[in-house]
Image: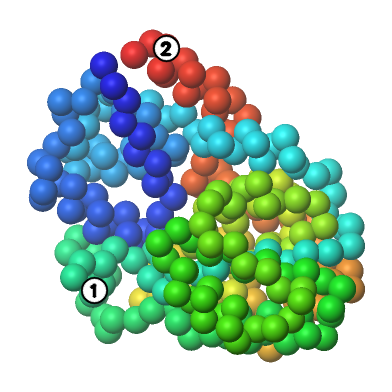
């Protein structure tokens, strides 16, 4: 026996529709697998919808790595911000692409023009550099994703000379999630892990991108976490740095955590039980 880890269970609706259609067309089914463990009910529903795995073979175990975030959870997030961690947005995060273009096969919305998150990326970088310059006592970390942000980080390092701006290319993000941090990101699992830690979070999903077709390719977030535009993003960052208008966030995080990770408190035990039984 051997185990195959199908890790990526956190997806936008658009990505899910296309990737599971792709699985169905190219692999027909995974019914030769003895058992399958998944993070959430959404993944289970899609495996069943596309007739990829029998219902009695699927076990929802939750998100085992989330236990680390629970251990580092803070009781309140009103402490003074010392570090801003920007989980760098991937230009095509949430989109399933083939041959360099957005793949529409299986998508439930009408076909639309190709696009990327590049305008948001440029906007966030611009604001963070301004904040870094105006607040030299605040550290800002740009956390890149392996195989995605290497060239961008090289470019930014040449451009940015601020001593309070740092770059990390690759590696896991959850170990960066610590008290006194403000987390910024979009379509990143690390952002949801930050919710589990009860850290302060800003999502730069501007109003322009909350309707068709863009909203089909984003994770689900409470609207109070969203910056409306570039000006609003800077204002909200400064509000956090100055501890102004900080509302209770736990209820705003609950929906996203439940949607993607199910029950996380016993996820390690459920995964261990799954492995031992099979």
Residue 239 visible at all = no
Give the residue at mark 2: 276
Q: Earlier in the sequence, mark 1 or mark 2?
A: 1
Residue closer to the observer: 11 or 100? 100
Residue 84 point in image, percent of width and height: 73, 67
Quadrant in which the C terminus is drawn: top left
Residue 29 point in image, percent of width and height: 14, 37
- Residue at image location 33% in from the left, 62% down from the top: 14
Is label 1 in a helix, a strand or a loop? loop
- In this picture, is 215 found above or below 277? below
Q: Residue 218 bears which disc, if any?
A: none
- Residue at image location 59% in from the left, 74% down from the top: 204
Label 1 and label 2: CA atoms lie apart by 42 Å
Q: On the picture, is 183 further left or further right than 99? A: right
Residue 81 visible at all = yes
Give the residue at mark 1: 100
- Residue at image location 52% in from the left, 41% down from the top: 261
Residue closer to the observer: 276 or 56? 276
Q: On the picture, is 261 further left or further right than 45? A: right
Residue 224 point in image, percent of width and height: 67, 67
Question: Mark 2, residues whose alpha carbon is within 10 Å: few (<14), some, or many (≥20)?
Answer: few
Residue closer to the observer: 137 or 209? 137
């Amino acid at each position: 026996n051997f185990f195959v880890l199908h890790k990526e269970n956190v997806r936008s609706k658009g990505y899910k529709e296309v990737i599971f259609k792709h699985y169905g067309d190219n692999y027909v089914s995974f019914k030769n697998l003895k058992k399958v463990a998944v993070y959430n009910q959404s993944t289970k529903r899609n495996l069943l919808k596309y007739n990829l795995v029998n219902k009695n073979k699927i076990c929802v175990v939750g998100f085992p790595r989330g236990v680390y975030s629970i251990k580092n959870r803070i009781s309140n997030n009103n402490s003074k911000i010392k570090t801003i961690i920007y989980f760098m947005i991937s230009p095509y995060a949430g989109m399933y692409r083939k041959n360099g273009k957005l793949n529409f096969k299986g998508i439930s919305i009408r076909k639309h023009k190709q696009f990327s998150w590049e305008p948001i990326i440029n906007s966030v970088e611009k604001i963070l550099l301004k904040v870094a310059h105006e607040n030299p006592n605040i550290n800002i970390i740009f956390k890149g994703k392996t195989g995605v942000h290497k060239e961008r980080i090289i470019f930014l390092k040449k451009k940015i000379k601020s001593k309070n701006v740092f770059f990390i290319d690759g590696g896991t993000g959850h170990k960066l999630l610590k008290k006194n941090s403000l987390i910024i990101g979009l379509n990143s699992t690390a952002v949801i892990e930050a919710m589990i830690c009860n850290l302060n979070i800003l999502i730069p999903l501007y109003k322009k991108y909350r309707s068709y077709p863009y909203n089909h390719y984003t994770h689900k977030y409470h609207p109070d976490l969203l910056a409306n535009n570039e000006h609003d993003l800077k204002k909200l960052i400064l509000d956090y740095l100055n501890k102004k208008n900080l509302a209770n966030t736990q209820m705003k995080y609950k929906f996203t955590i439940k949607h993607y990770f199910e029950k996380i408190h016993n996820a390690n035990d459920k995964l261990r039980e799954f492995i031992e039984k099979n």
